């Protein structure tokens, strides 16, 4: 085999890798490859839609690098045979660096676009792909690109699918499920784990946010009567978490950023309140000025489902705690808060948000009217019982017989029980008062009736299912919430009205009407017509 006679500063073959970085030139080419890859990965985090024109332009640039480094050499000179009249292509020495740079850009673009296309086919919206997938991928790519180069080995770049954190992966699964048509794909198998694997992978409980009450990824209800001072209480809580202080002199808080999403107070009202609580607690502005953020959404409100697009713009781990005040205004329009299925669905979405953002949620809600003294902790709160069962911590404030005092009590899922404690209102904060008995809850004294009132009470017929159906249900389908409101306005308790509604339905006096999976259930005295035959 004849020896090639190459012109100066040329090589016989084109090399854009991958190759072991075993020489200074190849090490430089490896660094160029990583720089090209990382530049496209960084740009991909800001994509709003897959840029097909970028794919073509990068491939064109890669081909241009090769063409630019080509040199035509007469075959007679290259092979030392004067009789040959053809030409051969050789390449400029050192082309490996430019070639590797172009290859890195092309491969990063192909990985990102392929991932985007697959996710789009699965029903993932474009606005979720960047923050949930490409952003964590870029973070891993930057670490890989900065890592030392091993002359004895090739280190491939991270791929998007393997860089998705568990919390983002969970939200992607929920987005996929939301896009599936009813009766469509076969549901996936249960994510089972053996006990050994369970203990190995989860040796500890989730990290606390509020010791004794709340952990990362959990939700906590704060329930009290209207105008009790719930918003002042959660402002105090938010500042305690931001400053890493005790809350109410009882619960240690892990320091972290807090987001308060308020749909009742104007910006000016919140700006007026926060400094008062800071002053009462002795918290300087320097300690919390950049750690507590407020979003006043009064007048521009979205419900829990609509908040998904807002939460997707938050980086996971950005906030340790998110407060929703007040929860009833985040419920979808025409939603029946007394329907257990609907309430469970809301909390399922909140669990997904908490998992995706790596934070805890606090939901501020009101209790029902009337005395709360005779109720258990989990029965306090307006609406269906699912709200206390679906949450991780159900914290309630009930009036104490002492004026300006309440009793704090809670039921927790992942913490030991706490002892009830009396709090006294001293504007603008609640402070513990251990001199008072937590068992001395205020009871509503029945109003005295005159003889005429007693006679009217005796003469009034007892409520049964038939009377209930006749009084509050008609041939026109009405939402359950509207029927129960009418019944409570007539003097029935919520529990009694709900019981009579169920009895009337079970006895065939009223019938359930459904209009879609996300629409509230309605009731009428006539049965809902079936589809035409």
Image (cartoon, grey):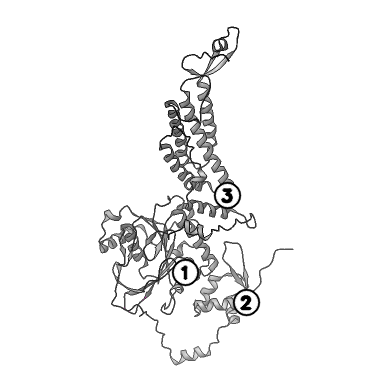
Quarter in which the C terminus is drawn: bottom right
Q: Residues within 10 Å of mark 1 (few under 14, many from 20)?
A: many
Residue 527, label in figure = none
Name which residue lies at 65% across and 57% down.
183
Q: CA distance from mark 1 to mark 2?
A: 26 Å
Q: Residues within 10 Å of mark 2 (few under 14, many from 20)?
A: few
In magenta stretch: residue 402: yes
Residue 461 appears at what percent x and percent y?
55, 87
Q: Main secondary structure of the magenta part?
A: loop
Residue, disc 3: 123
Residue 502 drawn above or below residue 230: below
Residue 388, label in figure = 1
Quarter in which the N terminus is drawn: top right
Residue 506, label in figure = 2
Q: Which residues, given as a range, are shown in magenta?
A: 399-404
Camera-side residue: 192 or 72?
Answer: 192
User: Is 65 placed left or right of 184 in the picture?
Assistant: left
């Amino acid at each position: 085999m004849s020896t090639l006679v190459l012109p100066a500063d040329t090589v016989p073959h084109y090399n854009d890798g991958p190759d072991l970085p075993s020489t200074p030139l190849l090490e430089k080419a490896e660094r160029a490859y990583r720089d090209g890859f990382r530049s496209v990965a960084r740009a991909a985090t800001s994509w709003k839609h897959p840029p097909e024109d970028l794919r073509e332009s990068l491939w064109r640039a890669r081909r241009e690098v090769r063409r630019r480094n080509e040199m035509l050499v007469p075959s007679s000179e290259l092979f030392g045979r004067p009789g040959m009249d053809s030409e051969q292509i050789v390449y400029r020495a050192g082309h490996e660096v430019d070639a590797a740079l172009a290859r890195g850009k092309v491969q990063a673009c192909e990985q990102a676009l392929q991932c985007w296309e697959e996710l789009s086919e699965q029903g993932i919206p474009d606005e979720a792909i960047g923050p949930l997938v490409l952003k964590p991928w870029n973070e891993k790519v930057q670490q890989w690109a900065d890592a030392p180069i091993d002359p004895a080995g090739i280190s491939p770049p991270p791929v998007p699918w393997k860089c998705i954190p568990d919390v983002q992966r969970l939200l992607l699964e929920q987005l996929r499920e939301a896009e599936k048509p009813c009766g469509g794909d076969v549901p996936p198998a249960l994510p089972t784990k053996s006990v050994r694997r369970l203990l190995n992978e989860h040796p500890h409980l989730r990290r606390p946010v509020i010791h004794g009450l709340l952990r990362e990824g959990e939700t906590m209800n704060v329930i009290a009567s209207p105008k009790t001072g719930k918003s002042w209480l959660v402002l105090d809580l938010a500042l305690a978490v931001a400053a890493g202080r005790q809350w109410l002199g009882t619960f240690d808080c892990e320091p972290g950023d807090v987001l308060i999403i308020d749909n009742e107070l104007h910006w000016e009202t919140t700006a007026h309140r926060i400094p008062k609580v800071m002053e009462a607690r002795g918290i300087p502005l320097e300690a919390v000025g950049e750690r507590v953020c407020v979003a006043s959404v009064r007048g521009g409100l979205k419900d829990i489902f609509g908040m998904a697009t807002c939460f997707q713009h938050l980086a996971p781990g950005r906030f340790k705690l998110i407060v929703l005040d007040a929860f009833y205004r985040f419920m979808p329009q025409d939603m029946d808060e007394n329907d257990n299925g609907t309430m469970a669905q809301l909390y399922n979405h909140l669990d997904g948000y908490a998992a995706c953002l790596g934070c805890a949620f606090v939901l501020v809600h009101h209790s029902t009217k009337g005395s709360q003294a005779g109720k258990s902790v989990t029965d306090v709160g307006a609406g269906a019982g699912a709200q206390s069962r679906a949450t991780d911590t159900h914290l309630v404030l009930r009036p104490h017989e002492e004026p300006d005092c309440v009793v704090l009590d809670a039921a927790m899922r992942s913490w030991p029980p706490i002892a009830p404690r009396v709090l006294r209102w001293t504007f603008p904060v609640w402070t513990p008062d251990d001199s008072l008995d937590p068992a001395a809850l205020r009871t509503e004294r029945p109003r005295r009736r005159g003889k005429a009132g007693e006679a009217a009470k005796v003469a009034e017929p007892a409520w049964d299912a038939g009377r209930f159906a006749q009084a509050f249900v008609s041939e026109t389908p009405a939402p359950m919430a509207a029927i129960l409101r009418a019944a409570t306005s007539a003097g029935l308790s919520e529990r009694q009205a709900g019981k009579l509604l169920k009895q009337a339905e079970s006895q065939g006096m009223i019938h359930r009407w459904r209009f879609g999976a996300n629409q509230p259930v309605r009731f009428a005295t006539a049965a809902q017509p079936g589809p035409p035959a």
